[in-house]
Image (tube, grey):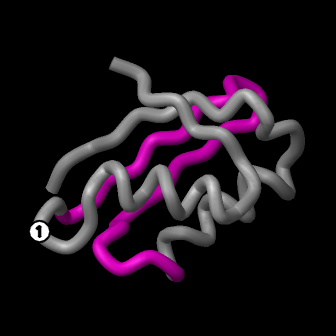
């Protein structure tokens, strides 16, 4: 399992965070999502044999948010 750290500057409220955390259920390979609108950051634990970081970022974009990779 790998971890992806993203900054989501357009996440403004708890509903935004809950929407992003829904990727746990909706995107195969995503194990856990921890999204905080206070810090505007999101941590995703995922199975790299099922989903790629680009796939996760694209799913975030489809939800209407702009992810930036934190190195």
Residue 56 in percent (x, y) is at 42, 57
Secondary structure beneath dot 1 equals loop
Residue shown at the point (70%, 63%) measured from the top left? 63
Residue 60 in percent (x, y) is at 59, 56
Q: Quadrant of residue 4?
A: top left
Front one among 10 and 54:
54
Residue 24 in percent (x, y) is at 48, 71
Q: Is residue 57 left or right of residue 17?
A: left
In the rendered view, would you say 69 is above or below 35?
above
In the rendered view, would you say 9 is above or below 15?
above
Residue shown at the point (33%, 18%) measured from the top left? 71
Q: Is residue 45 left or right of residue 65?
A: left
Q: Is residue 69 left or right of residue 40?
A: left
Q: Residues within 10 Å of mark 1 (few under 14, many from 20)?
A: few
Residue shown at the point (61%, 45%) measured from the top left? 35
Residue 25 in percent (x, y) is at 51, 80
Tell me, yes or no, whether the highlighted magenta stretch contains residue 59.
no
Front one among 23 and 55:
55
Q: Is residue 30 left or right of residue 42?
A: left
Q: Quadrant of the N terminus?
A: bottom left
Tell me, yes or no, whether the highlighted magenta stretch contains residue 28.
yes
Q: Which residue is mark 1?
A: 49
Residue shown at the point (62%, 71%) measured from the top left? 22
Magenta region: 26-47
């Amino acid at each position: 399992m790998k971890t992806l750290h993203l900054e989501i500057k357009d996440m403004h409220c708890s509903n935004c965070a809950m929407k992003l955390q829904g990727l746990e259920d909706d995107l195969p390979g995503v194990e856990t999502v921890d999204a905080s609108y206070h810090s505007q950051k999101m941590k995703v634990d995922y199975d790299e044999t099922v989903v790629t970081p680009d796939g996760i970022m694209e799913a975030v974009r489809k939800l209407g948010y702009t992810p930036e990779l934190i190195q």
